[in-house]
Image (cartoon, helix red, strand yellow):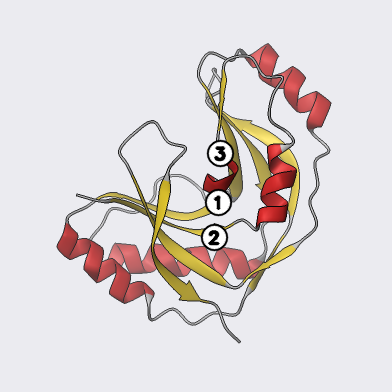
Amino acid sequence: MPRLFTGLEIPSQTGLMLSMLRGGLRGARWIDPENYHITLRFIGDIDDRTADEIADALDRIRRKPVEIRLSGLGSFGNGKPHAVWARVEPTPELNELQAEQERIIQRLNLPPERRKYLPHVTIARCRTSSNEDVAKWLSERGNFQAPPFVAGRFVLFSAKASVGGGPYLVEEAYPLAA
């Protein structure tokens, strides 16, 4: 049973810049640069037939390439941090691509995503990091910016059932073309 999600890949130069942020955060498990991505829609563990239906439905998306800008850092956690990430500036084009995928997934009778979409690139999982550790790390690196890039495709990724962070495999790639 595959665990699937859709996302945008990160160019190697941007990945290199993100990887330079690694270190200095106690209790963090750093994501390998080859596994950096921007999740569009987490799908979850599904059967092979549903996976084929999703792959087929995503192939009907027709969108233009999306410009991506990374600006700033943040963390997720409700009382205790569980991840640190680079912020992706939301744009109408990115939000529309994500929303179209959400509609497609729901039409295939999969549950809607409960969380509000917040585009980001996870760079570390926080195993035992304290709020103070994360706040200090963010304050030292929070002005992070990378040059913009254009995402010319989105992909359907598969992941092994684990705590997250990869390795991720590209199952299908879908061009974004004018």
Residue to which mark 3 is pinned:
32
User: Residue shown at 55%/51% (left/top)?
Assistant: 37
Left or right? Give the position of 72 relative to 131: right
- Residue 27 visible? The answer is yes
| 3D distance between C-alphas at marks 1 and 2 | 6 Å
Q: Residues within 10 Å of mark 3 (few under 14, many from 20)?
A: some
State the residue position of label 1.
37
Amino acid at pointer 3:
Asp
Q: In this view, does 148 lie to the left or right of 9?
A: right
Mark 1 and mark 2 lie on one chain; the one further toward the N terminus is: 2
| Amino acid on which disc 2 is placed | Leu
Residue 74: percent from the left, percent from the top? Answer: 68, 34
65 horizontally vs 89: left or right: left
Residue depicted at x 66% and y 57%: 90
What element does badge 1 sit on?
strand
- Residue 89 seen in the current view: no
User: Taking 115 as reference, is 141 above or below it?
Assistant: above
Pick whichever of labels 3 and 2 is earlier in the sequence: 2
Q: Which mark is residue 8?
A: 2
Percent of width and height locating residue 76: 57, 31
Q: Are marks 1 and 2 in contact (CB under 8 Å)?
A: yes
SS under mark 3: loop
